[in-house]
Image (spheres, rainbow, N blue to C red):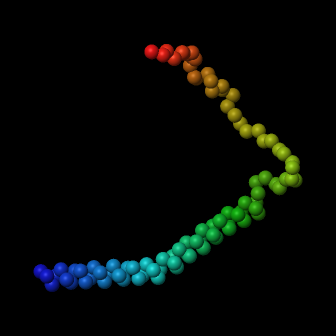
Amino acid sequence: MLAGLIKFLFWFFFISYLIKILTRLLAPILLKRFANKMQDRFQQQFNQQHQNPQNPPQQEGKVTLEKTKSSTKNKSDNLGDYVDFEEVEE
């Protein structure tokens, strides 16, 4: 029984130490790889936005207004009746 406990503790600490060492070795590599992937994604999005702009570039100071479709129904129609009230101090 005591030999089994010692054997278990040995393997437990050995595996935990091994995981600790592997984590210290692999974590920087994995983080750098992840950062490079994210950088590539952002670079691709940036390039797509500036190579194919939906709106052509405009002169500085020029203002354009674009109309958007809006519902013609007034939102206040569904609010109900307004009730005025006064606070009563007791």
Query: Residue sitting at 16 percent across and 82 percent down?
Result: 4
Position of 81 with respect to 67 (left or right) is left
Screen quadrant of the N terminus? bottom left
Q: Is residue 11 above or below residue 85?
A: below
Q: Position of residue 88 (x, y in %)?
A: 49, 15
Query: Residue sitting at 25 percent across and 83 percent down?
Result: 10
Position of 76 with respect to 46 (left or right) is left
Quadrant of the image occupied by residue 41: bottom right
Q: How many marks?
A: 0
Quadrant of the image occupied by residue 6: bottom left
Query: Residue sitting at 76 percent across and 62 percent down?
Result: 50
Q: Position of residue 57 (x, y in %)?
A: 83, 55
Position of 22 with respect to 77 (left or right) is left
Query: Residue sitting at 54 percent across and 15 percent down?
Result: 86
Q: Position of residue 75 (x, y in %)?
A: 63, 27
Residue projecting furthest to the left: 1
Screen quadrant of the C terminus? top left
Q: Position of residue 21 (x, y in %)?
A: 41, 82
Q: Is residue 55 above or below residue 71?
A: below
Front-lying residue, 39 or 28:
28
Quadrant of the image occupied by residue 66: top right
Front-lying residue, 32 or 45:
32
